[in-house]
Amino acid sequence: MGDYSKALEFYEKSLEIRKKALPSNHPDLATSYDNIGQVYNNMGDYSKALEFYEKSHKIFEKALPSNHPDLATSYCNIGQVYNNMGDYSKALEFYEKSHEIYEKALPSNHPSLATSYSNIGQVYNNMGDYSKALEFYEKSHKIREKALPSNHPSLATSYSNIGGVYSDMGDYLKALEFYEKDLEITKKALPSNHPSLATSYNNIGLVYNNMGDYSKALEFYEKSHKIFEKALPSNHPHLVVSHLNFAACYEKMGDYTTALKALKNAYQIQQKAFEEGNSAFASTYSRFGRVYRNTKDYSKSLDYFQKCLTIFQRTLPERHPNQAITYSNIGDVHRLMGDCEMAISFHRKALNIQENVQCDPTDCATTYINLGETYRQMKDYTRALTYYQKGLEIREKKLPKNHPDLAVVYHNLSKLYLSTRQYNMAMKNVQQAVEIAEEKLPSNHPHILEYKETF
């Protein structure tokens, strides 16, 4: 039910009794360490979790045969902590050790095997290898469908995982379909204040945000946040996610003050939970970079994007989609600061990844559009048009017709056509931009004012 301090209290009492009554290598002691590790993991205190999981693992290694399922669970727990800490290669190493034991020791339709496939899928998803992630999530889902009743929470998790991959790949309708299946089961199976329900609401909010429906996104984010606030300690990493999502939404709505406030809330929690530079800070730095870019504080923006990039370069594979997004963000700030050559070199780095690995196509579209803006600024209108059209083609294919990100491209095109004196085309594009913005954005949004000025 998410009351971690109470759980910790009981598990610690149990451990004290077992320590006095049992020899130091007794499996029941390992179980106690394991339980405490699990609570710390749920609380987001990963170094403490690792400490207890490793104590447990040492006992299991001595006391159990090498193919015992409890040993597999132990490897799995350690893998989970590494995954939460963003050390994906280490996570994969432990998950695979665990999986090897499960495959030998369990029947092929055992739920633990499904969890094992799911864990490996999650690491691949975090590493940006979406086809591999889907492959493992679907293996997991097949077992669960056969082995579990149709309203079992593990099936909900399965739907949620698959939805997450589709969301990362930019297939938002497919993501929504799976997330709604997850929510349906979670609502029936769990109490109304359970953190898993908050996660379900949060995921749906995320998809609406990506689809440009910001008021709908906020509605789901708020449902999620209310549960997290009641169920979790005030410094829990899940609350960070909550604040970051609010920040992203308010930024898109043009309310930069509220976005910054949400970001500062997220950052304060992270500072208590992690050392500066931990991989958990990457998305917070990136968000700060975006908001400061919008408020035209370019040196601050650049500083945050660089911090984000430093973390990604240290923790992610070289050609990870998140690195590409950060290169493109840095390139865009250089353009806004008037250094177009530098901007182009960063956008090229981004495309070098985005055109060669599987990533969200809308991220690639953003890089094309950023390049288009850079060439327009350099008065190279032919090249600018080519990149705008590449970006627009992807966005028109992937996003709803009235998505605010489409308005951005139409507005860019109208500025280009103005410069080349094609006034009819300029008028047509700016009208499209204004129509979308008036329908989808708050009336005081900076983009609306900008589009009307061009108009």
Image (spheres, helix red, strand yellow):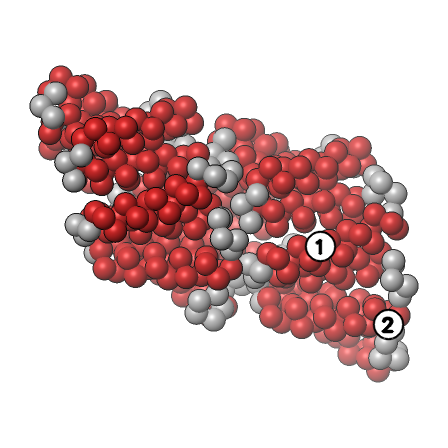
Question: Circle 1: is it few (<14), some (14-19), or many (20+) Cα within 10 Å?
Answer: many
At horizontal 49% and vertical 48% (from top left) the residue drawn is: 320
Left or right: residue 61 versus residue 382 is right
At horizontal 88% and vertical 51% (from top left) the residue drawn is: 105
**Distance in Å between CA atoms under marks 1 and 2:** 20 Å
Residue type pointed to by label 2? Lys
Is 280 drawn above or below residue 362 in the view shown? below
Residue 26 lies, in percent from the top left, at 87, 73
Residue 265 lies, in percent from the top left, at 39, 60
How many numbered marks, from 0 up? 2
Residue type pointed to by label 1? Tyr
Q: Earlier in the sequence, mark 1 or mark 2?
A: 2
Residue at the disc numbered 2: 62
State the residue lying farthest toward the top: 424
Question: Circle 2: is it few (<14), some (14-19), or many (20+) Cα within 10 Å?
Answer: few
Residue 95 tag number:
1
Q: Nearer the viewer, residue 195 or 274?
A: 274
Observer able to see residue 349: yes
Q: Nearer the viewer, residue 29 or 4?
A: 29
